[in-house]
């Protein structure tokens, strides 16, 4: 029997968030103090990432101590430095004799057009997110963390867009738990049970259907800014590096179920998978729950998003 549980049921991971609500940007960190097996899958055409090459199963990376999801476009990668500094101070990471080196992976989304383009997640913000993770801060959905400046439905331009955000979901089948945290900032629309629940507004109180718009205008390639869905799957499954990579790939199935179109040229859709290793399971069982968790986390993100400026939210 599968039941939905809170993301906090995965006790091997700490989640911390911080944001500048006026500037509409922020970051979310997922920390594994003991180090977790990690995989990644990047399918969007415009990604911005840090230290993902080391996650290839043929590389030597044994564990990851934190995954950072951040706004700020390429500038937001600076926040990972603050995460690394915080973890080093707590001696979380690889002991190399002269210090402790934490393995920190990161991915960013473009939110510069939502609030202030001059304020971006930096090292101080990454450090603060870690402090919040260790202070017991509950996970907050919507306009928080990496979802603070997220917007969705930009196929007719920002004038028709809506507010995106960050969300979570987790599912349990006996001892196996798989969760997901998703920052939703896509070009397209978010779909739940086959119905668009948020996305490109048609100006008449409904939705314009981003896929139809892109198909109708297939000769004119627009340059859509301010995009990307970022996900971190977390699980207690015991998987090797190849299994964690496959889990991240299956997490992208959840993106494809919930976002239309998914993995566009202008999105940087990236999924990480962190495995803490307490539960023996088949890979397929973990992948089924990962797909469900990502799909549900995306819906949770937009349902929790509240209006900001001209961007209408569902929350």
Image (spheres, rainbow, N blue to C red):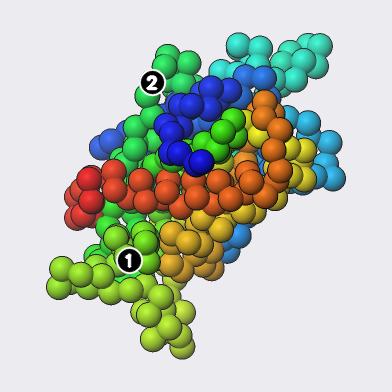
Image position, residue 232 (x, y; %) = 54, 41
The residue that appears at 77% across and 15% down in the rendered structure is 95
Instruction: Give neighbour class at mark 1: few <14, some 14-19, many 20+ (Cα, 10 Å).
Output: few
Location of residue 188 (image quadrant): bottom left
Image position, residue 246 (x, y; %) = 70, 50
Image position, residue 206 (x, y; %) = 20, 70
- Judging from the image, what secondary structure is the residue with disc 2 in? loop
Quadrant where the C terminus sits is top left
- Viewer-nearest residue: 282 or 163: 282
- Judging from the image, what secondary structure is the residue with disc 1 in? strand
- Viewer-nearest residue: 71 or 286: 286
Q: Is residue 192 left or right of residue 14?
A: left
The residue that appears at 78% across and 34% down in the rendered structure is 61
Mark found first going from the N terminus, 2 or 1: 2
Above or below 305: residue 145: above
The residue that appears at 41% across and 79% down in the rendered structure is 214
Instruction: Give neighbour class at mark 2: few <14, some 14-19, many 20+ (Cα, 10 Å).
Output: some
The residue that appears at 23% across and 51% down in the rendered structure is 313
Badges 2 and 1: C-beta atoms under 8 Å apart? no
Image position, residue 281 (x, y; %) = 69, 38
Task: Single out the residue that lies furthest toward the front.
Answer: 1
Above or below 183: residue 161: below
How many marks can you see? 2
Residue 195 badge? 1
Task: Single out the residue that lies furthest toward the left.
Answer: 204
Foreground mark, 2 or 1, reads: 1
**For mark 2, what is the residue?**
137
Q: Is residue 299 visible?
A: yes
- Viewer-nearest residue: 275 or 60: 275
Q: Is residue 25 left or right of residue 63?
A: left
Q: Is residue 119 visible?
A: no
Q: Is residue 158 left or right of residue 239?
A: left
């Amino acid at each position: 029997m599968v039941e939905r549980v809170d993301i906090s049921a995965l006790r091997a991971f700490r989640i911390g968030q911080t944001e500048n609500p006026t500037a509409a940007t922020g970051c979310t960190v997922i920390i594994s103090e003991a180090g977790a097996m990690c995989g990644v899958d990047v399918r969007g055409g415009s990604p911005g990432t840090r230290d993902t090459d080391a996650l290839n199963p043929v590389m030597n990376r044994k564990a990851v101590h934190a995954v950072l999801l951040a706004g700020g476009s390429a500038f937001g990668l600076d926040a990972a430095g603050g995460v690394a500094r915080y973890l080093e101070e707590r001696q979380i990471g690889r002991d190399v004799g002269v210090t402790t080196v934490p393995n920190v992976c990161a991915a960013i989304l473009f939110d510069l057009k939502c609030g202030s383009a001059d304020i971006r997640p930096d090292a101080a913000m990454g450090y603060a997110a870690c402090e919040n993770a260790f202070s017991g801060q509950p996970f907050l959905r919507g306009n928080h963390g990496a979802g603070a400046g997220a917007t969705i439905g930009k196929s007719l331009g920002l004038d028709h867009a809506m507010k995106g955000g960050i969300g979570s979901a987790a599912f349990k089948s006996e001892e196996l738990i798989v969760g997901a945290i998703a920052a939703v900032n896509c070009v397209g629309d978010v779909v739940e049970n086959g119905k668009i629940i948020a996305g490109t507004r048609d100006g008449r109180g409904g939705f314009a259907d981003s896929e139809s718009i892109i198909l109708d205008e297939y000769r004119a390639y627009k340059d859509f800014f301010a995009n990307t869905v970022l996900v971190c799957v977390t699980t207690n499954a015991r998987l090797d590096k190849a299994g964690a990579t496959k889990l991240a790939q299956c997490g992208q199935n959840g993106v494809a179920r919930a976002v239309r179109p998914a993995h566009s040229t202008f999105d940087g859709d990236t999924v990480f998978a962190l495995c803490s290793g307490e539960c023996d399971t088949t890979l397929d069982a973990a992948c089924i729950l990962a797909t469900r968790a990502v799909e549900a986390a995306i819906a949770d993100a937009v349902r929790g998003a509240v209006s900001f400026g001209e961007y209408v939210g569902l929350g």
